[in-house]
Image (spheres, rainbow, N blue to C red):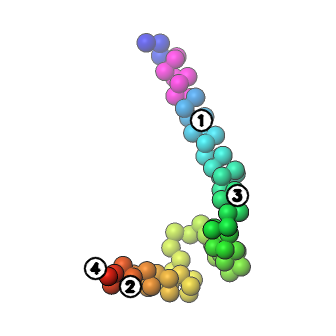
Amino acid sequence: MDPNSSLSKRISAFLASIAGCLVMIYVVGPWLDTLESIKPLADFIDERNIDANAYYYTEVEEFADAELNMKNTMQYMPK
């Protein structure tokens, strides 16, 4: 097996991965933002200047309430 062939396949796969990430960020992401099921949530986040990149929203009151409701829903689900 030619080592250069293996290297070129790995480089091609790496470049394809980068291209896939860029397509997700700049094409698919903005398109999803326009869907009618996602648009209200995106508008809510924009109107309240919420940092949507944060992993935990501990300083945002709305998310603290949502987390409490979600925990209660999961804990007291009908059986």
**Image marks 4 and 1: residues in contact by CB distance under 8 Å:** no
Q: Amino acid at mark 1?
A: Ala
Q: Is residue 69 left or right of residue 57?
A: left
| 3D distance between C-alphas at marks 3 and 2 | 33 Å
Disc 2 marks which residue? 72
Magenta stretch: helix, strand or loop mostly: helix
Q: Using the image as rendered, state which of residue 74 and residue 64 is in the foreground.
A: 74
Q: Which residue is mark 3?
A: 30
Q: CA distance from mark 4 to mark 3?
A: 40 Å
* Amino acid type, residue under disc 3 in the picture: Pro
Q: Is residue 75 visible?
A: no
**Label 4 is placed on what type of residue?**
Lys
Rounded to the nearest angstrom, the CA distance separating label 3 from label 1 is 20 Å
- Judge whether residue 50 is colored magenta: no
| Residue stretch in magenta | 4-11
Query: Disc 4 vs disc 3: which is toward the camera?
Result: 4
9 or 67, which lies in front? 67
Between discs 4 and 1, the one toward the N terminus: 1
- Badge 4 density bin: few <14, some 14–19, many ≥20, Cα 10 Å: few
